[in-house]
Image (tube, helix red, strand yellow):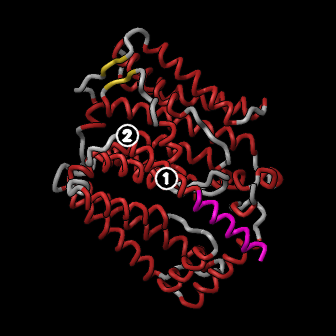
Amino acid sequence: MSGTDVEPATEPTAARVATDLQDERLSQGAGGLKGALAGLGSRVRGGDLGVIPVVAGLVIIAVVLQSLNSQFLSAANLENLLLECVPVGVIALGIVFVLLVAEIDLSVGSISGLSAALLAVFYVDRGQSVVLAIAVAVGSGVLIGLLYGQIFNRIGVPSFVISLAGLLAFAGLQLAVLGTKGAINLPFDSALVKFAQLQFMPDWLSYALVLAGGIGLFATGFARAQARRKASLSAQSTVSLAVRSIALIVLVGAFVAYLNDSRGIGYMFVFFLALVLVMHYVLTRTKFGKSLFAVGGNAEAARRAGINVRRVYASAFVLCTTLAAVGGVLAAARLAAANQQSGGGDVNLNAIAAAVIGGTSLFGGRGSAFAALLGILVIQSISNGLTLLSLDSSYRFMVTGAVLLLAVGLDSVARRSRASSGRA
């Protein structure tokens, strides 16, 4: 595993140090927005593409599909697209955590299907409260993650083999839980189904959240800039921070206003977005998050730095399987049913593909919570657009596969570029 992807708490490479120093000089020399743009250009030349490829891909997909079908960018279609993103997007968010430590989980689809089955059995067949049913379903994901962590840490079985065995075992357990019925419908008047299908934010609340997001972005950026100045480091100017926040409020506000002409933003998508923001905070502002990057970049260096590597691996597995279970609950709520096909089909592959397409490295040590959001938007946009064009699933699989190969190819090229910079 290359050390070029190591975050703080591991030994920095020559390429990383050189890039950081160059960014510092650019920011100090130019200042403000100009310095930020110059620093971005420097990182791109050094092989750090960030979210540029996936954002560019989303724009291209939107333009092409809108030109082929004028309904693609309609407010009603975009509302449904966002809601359809959520179940697999939540699962992809868990995949990000295991990829960050350079491992994999192939069983997330089966875990989500088992979670959906448990939810339906406890809620419908056994007449338990929806809260208890959800707790049992999500709890199953927690227990599976703990089991994976113990097998991985104590026995040393590769995560590929563990999760492949889990894929088969939990798919079988799902069939056993559902029994001879094969499918269980959830009540359409239940709070869970309404949350996934019918509940949308009022206009005033959506605008208030946009404004709060812009203010929060400015506040966190300003606090970080103040801390850097106290440490005698370069920092973004207050003007550039204000411009960034205003741009966010204007752009997102315009998008929200467009959707509000129809039904607006679904609460289930807001839940997903909130989950992404929480996980982003965990990854970027906590010791645990830094430990994930360190272990993924270089596990031995992380161990020597005093990080409990086993605990980090176990935590990554637990987060992944727990979020897979949450995704299963949301999928069942969206469909208003759990059946033998829940979690099957392309759920596994789409979750992994979304994390990778969004910018999470398969080699560990690099990625973000927003990778799940961006990646699933790409995949669901392709699926939604091709459905509007009345094309069958064969085209969706082929196009998604091509996009995934392109994303991994860009990641590999970027890694070689950073490695070459380190040798220079």
Q: Given the current orientation, which residue lies at the most extreme top position?
A: 180
Q: Please name the amino acid that badge 1 sits on.
A: Ala
The disc placed on residue 220 is none
Q: Given the current orientation, which residue lies at the most extreme bottom position?
A: 29
Residue span colored magenta:
409-424
Residue 130 picture quarter? top left
**Percent of width and height locating residue 337:** 33, 24
The disc placed on residue 393 is 2
Does the stretch in magenta take in 419?
A: yes
Does the stretch in magenta take in 222?
A: no
Q: Given the current orientation, which residue lies at the most extreme left position?
A: 261
**Percent of width and height locating residue 349:** 51, 40
- In the rendered view, tell whether residue 413 sits above or below residue 204: below
Residue 228 picture quarter? bottom right
Q: Are marks 1 and 2 in contact (CB under 8 Å)?
A: no
The disc placed on residue 402 is 1
Q: Please name the amino acid that badge 2 sits on.
A: Ser
Residue in the foreground of this view, choosing between 246 and 82: 82
**Is residue 312 something that shows in the picture?**
yes
Q: Secondary structure at mark 2?
A: helix
**Percent of width and height locating residue 293:** 66, 55
- Looking at the rendered image, the quarter that the N terminus falls into is bottom right
**Percent of width and height locating residue 150:** 71, 30
- In the rendered view, tell whether residue 311 sits above or below residue 164: below
The residue under the point 62% across, 70% down is 47
The residue under the point 66% across, 51% down is 292
